[in-house]
Image: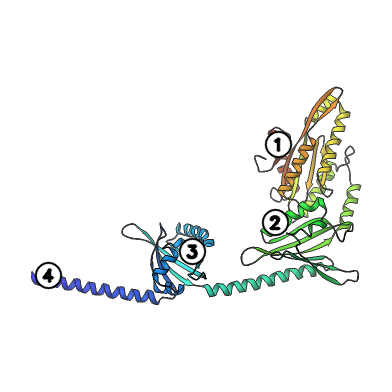
Amino acid sequence: MADTSISAENDIEKLKRELKDTREELDILLSSMPGGVMTYDADTGRILYVNEGLLTIFGCGEQEFREHFMDSFSLFVIKDDRRRIKELIDTQIQFFDHVELTYRSMGLADDVVWFNHKATLRQTDDGKKIFFCILSDVTEQRAIQNQLQATNEQLYMETERFKLIEEAIDNVEYDYDVDSDNLSVSRKDSGGVRHWKNIDHAMVGGQVYGSIHPDDLDVVKSVFGSALKNPGKGVVEYRMSVNGEAYLWYRLNYASFEGKNERIIRVVGSAKDITDEKLEQERLRSEAERDGMTGLLNKTAMQLYSAAHLSKSDFNDCHALFMIDTDNFKSVNDTLGHGIGDDTIRFVADNIRNVFRDTDLVGRMGGDEFMVLMSHTTLDIAKDRAQRLNDKIRSDVDGDGESVHISCSIGIAFFARDGEDYDTLFRAADSALYEAKEAGKDCYRIYGESVK
């Protein structure tokens, strides 16, 4: 019996020595691994273990490390990256028991360290979920990538700029630096020599806006605001006066670019003088078939011009199609007579013409129905025009001692969001008009929106 007890004690001592050796080997392995090792509680985020390799990256001891990050994995990740990292972890862990991430951490000396993070989720015998993480310092690699990205962005911007110049050498060229609010403008003089001029406080400071036609100012500001939000290309038409001379029409093709911080840093563009084109458009309009009572485009001309305009539009363009119906017009004819009814139609037509721009297509579709195609606009501007028209039409029509209250109902659809051709866009606007009628008239509705 005594021999058995001695043998068991020897076996226990042997196991203890093996366990100790294994732990020492594991510590040596963890200490010699490139990068660092960390474990943390998946539910609470509490850091449980860090190895010497990770401490070496931060140049501190374990106590300093834990005090700096307050034993929290969330605080280990730099503030600007936390939300993104949490969403990535939550998404990946739904399908896998491991995650791979790249994020920044703020060192003890306020230096930023980039980590490649590979972690596996394990559950212990007592039910705790723990992430076992291997962290590789990729700060140097990220710096090289950022430099390459900046170089590529600069090359791309220069390529785009000179491509625009090559494609339209007679155009006015623009190069806007967002951070300095400086606009470089290039024009050719009478001798064909191109000159660059710098304008300080150009856009934010408002120096450029003073030369834009007042009727086009909202559109230009809106387009510029969009260009500063998202990188991409676009086109806008506007009138501008140079050196106090008469307003000329321009079509500006522009492109905006973001820097390494995903913020727009530059906008370049090429503006073509399209004054002759606009005059020709006006001449064609004057010769086109007109509605005899109002002078507006008739139904056929309105459909043809609208379809042609939409077919030539780029998918990124934003046009608004308005369907306008005069409320209670039948009562005007029945109660006050057709003469006053005709005057009412002319009253509505004149107000529609005054609310919209000269460049917009405006037509009478028959009876008391009208249509407007407002080109190169925005949702907010379209809403503003609709509200103005509601306010102007709302009135009482008097005659022979009697009075009829009139107003207008408006339906609006947008190219290319609601349709990429005339027929589809017309149906969408007509559907929105029906909603305005159902809502009690004297209002406007946007296709796809249940309330104004």
The answer to whether residue 208 is above or below residue 152 is: above
Q: Quadrant of residue 119?
A: bottom left
Which residue is at a point 39% across and 77% down the rendered structure image? Answer: 32
Give whichever of discs 3 and 2 has the lower sequence position. 3
| Residue 118 located left or right of residue 218 | left
Q: What's the distance in space between the residues labelled 3 and 2, CA to CA?
A: 32 Å
Q: Farthest residue in the top direction? A: 401
Q: Quadrant of the N terminus?
A: bottom left
Q: Secondary structure at mark 4?
A: helix
Q: What's the distance in space between the residues labelled 1 and 2, CA to CA?
A: 29 Å
Q: What's the distance in space between the residues labelled 1 and 4, CA to CA?
A: 95 Å
Front residue of 86 and 297 = 86
* Circle 3: residue type: Val
Front residue of 291 and 155 = 155
Q: Foreground mark, 3 or 4?
A: 3
Residue denoted by label 1: 436
Where is residue 191 drawn, in percent x and y? 91, 71
Give whichever of discs 1 and 4 has the lower sequence position. 4
Q: Secondary structure at mark 3?
A: loop
Q: Residues within 10 Å of mark 4 (few under 14, many from 20)?
A: few
Give whichever of discs 1 and 3 has the lower sequence position. 3
Q: Secondary structure at mark 1?
A: helix
Where is residue 201 drawn, in percent x and y? 75, 62
* Circle 4: residue type: Ser
Residue denoted by label 4: 5
Give whichever of discs 3 and 4 has the lower sequence position. 4
* Circle 2: residue type: Ser
Which residue is at a point 86% across and 69% down the rendered structure image? Answer: 188
